[in-house]
Image (tube, rainbow, N blue to C red):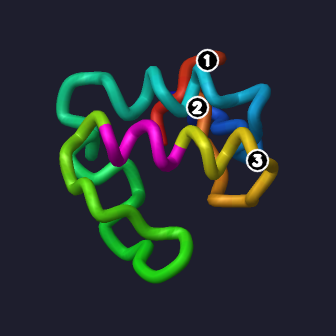
Amino acid sequence: MTVEIPQLEFREVTPDTWPEFERLFESRGSPKYCWCMVWRDGPVGISDKTRPAKKAAIESIIKSGTRVGILGYLDGEPVA
């Protein structure tokens, strides 16, 4: 029996990949409650802890060119 193992592709989160990052975080079961802002305090943190504020903050950070991580893709779709 032959088992085909899916191949993941990885890309850096950048302004160009923001739409995929957003799609991943808006998907069902995603971590949209934190938007990767839960551990960001100090100068890059935010005082408004609502979901929309966290999303806007991480979008601003990403679009400024700050490196925040990588996205994992399966069949061209962000999954991790």
Residue plotted at (64% across, 38% down): 8
Badge 3 amino acid: Ser
Q: What span is colored magenta in the figure?
A: 53-58
Which image quadrant is residue 25 in? Answer: top left
Q: Nearer the viewer, residue 14 or 9?
A: 14
x, y (%) of residue 76? Answer: 65, 17
Which image quadrant is residue 67 in? Answer: bottom right
Relative horizontal placement of residue 5, taking residue 15 as reference (left or right): left
Give the distance between the C-alpha atoms of the residues marked 2 and 1, in whole angstroms: 8 Å
Residue 78 vertical placement versus 11 (above, below)? above
Residue plotted at (61% across, 17% down): 75
Q: Are marks 2 and 1 in contact (CB under 8 Å)?
A: yes
Label 3: few (<14), some or many (≥20) within 10 Å? few
Label 1 residue SS: loop
Residue furthest to the bottom in view is 42
Residue plotted at (63% across, 51% down): 61
Label 2: few (<14), some or many (≥20) within 10 Å? few
Res. 77 visible in picture:
yes
Disc 3 versus disc 2: nearer the observer? 3
Q: Which of pointers 1 and 3 lies earlier in the amino acid sequence?
A: 3
Mark sitting on residue 6: 2
Q: Nearer the viewer, residue 5 or 75?
A: 75
Q: Which residue is mark 3?
A: 64
Q: Which residue is mark 1?
A: 75
Badge 2 amino acid: Pro
Disc 1 versus disc 3: nearer the observer? 3
x, y (%) of residue 72? Answer: 59, 41
Badge 1 amino acid: Asp
x, y (%) of residue 22? Answer: 48, 27
Mark sitting on residue 39: none
